[in-house]
Amino acid sequence: MNNTYKSLLLTVIVTMSGPVLAEHHESYSANEATAVAWVKAGHTGKAETKAMVEKNMAADGMAHQSRYVGFGFSYDPQNEDAMVITNITPDSPASAVLKEGDIFVSVRGVLATKENRERLSFRGKPGEAVEAVIRRDGKSRPVKISRGVIAAVASKPEVLENIESGDAEDWPVDEGEIVEVISKGNIVYVVHHVKDTDSQNEMVYEAYYISRFEFNDKGQVLNTRGLGEDRFVLEQTGYTISR
């Protein structure tokens, strides 16, 4: 799964598929230090990301995914034989049509093979209907789904499940930098710049991301939200919004 598509699916961690970030600030408050370490862990590796969430996310913590236009589902990227749906966002367009365990056979006539996954028509304008074929209970059936605006929220167990579904070898290490850390009360913003290489076409891209953290009185992350330049990344790596 390429880095840009993964950022659309797994931003519950703050854009998990990115580079290691350089140290930029010498003295942080406790909450600021945790927020910076959280961002760095998400850009370093699967084990580091999981350990950070397990230790520093509150039991009732929630991760707010960056909004995107799509169907509202994710699939197992480690399954090279079939595109199996592993999670569906509640109240999304996909929730009315698809079920966990469904397998995509084709999307708009393009076979859902490992080689074709980056060509499938999952991105585009909201309200645009997409016809596909899925396999459920061993039988193929046609489906039609209209794209919508997805704003998913994940609990701590769901965040950890998303991390576990990622490939530890697919956490690239490249250039990056913490640009600024801003806080007021229990809210911390981390501005970071990344530069990475798309794993599919080996094109270099860069982007700025803002990660917002809300802490409880115990210094644990109660809410986190990532804002980024995903469309900007797509355009730098040769994709368009109509793809």
Image (spheres, rainbow, N blue to C red):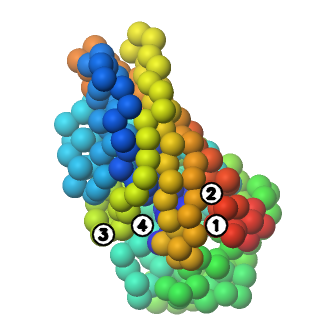
Q: Report which residue position mark 3 lands on.
A: 169
Instruction: Please name the residue shown 27% across and 41% down the image.
Output: 53
Badge 3 vs badge 2, beta-carbon distance below 8 Å: no
Q: Relative to residue 149, is residue 61 drawn left or right?
A: left
Q: Where is 20 relative to 118, above or below?
A: above
Tell me the distance, in whole angstroms, between the alpha carbons under discs 2 and 4: 25 Å
Residue 124 in the image, given as x and y percentages of width and height: 74, 63
Residue 199 in the image, given as x and y percentages of width and height: 48, 72
Q: Where is 208 relative to 121, above or below?
A: above
Give the residue type that dot 1 points to: Thr
* Mark 2, other Cα within 10 Å: few <14 / some 14–19 / many ≥20: many
Badge 1 vs badge 2, beta-carbon distance below 8 Å: yes
Q: Report which residue position mark 4 lands on.
A: 86
Instruction: Please name the residue shown 44% across and 41% down the image.
Output: 177
Instruction: Please name the residue shown 74% across and 66% down the image.
Output: 240
Tell me the distance, in whole angstroms, between the alpha carbons under discs 3 and 2: 21 Å
Q: Where is 9 relative to 2, above or below?
A: above
- Dot 4: element: strand
Give the residue type that dot 2 points to: Val
Residue 149 in the image, given as x and y percentages of width and height: 68, 49
Seen from the viewer's position, the closer of residues 177 and 18 is 177
Q: Report which residue position mark 2 lands on.
A: 233
Tell me the distance, in whole angstroms, between the alpha carbons under discs 1 and 3: 21 Å
Location of residue 126 by image quarter: bottom right
Q: Report which residue position mark 1 lands on.
A: 237
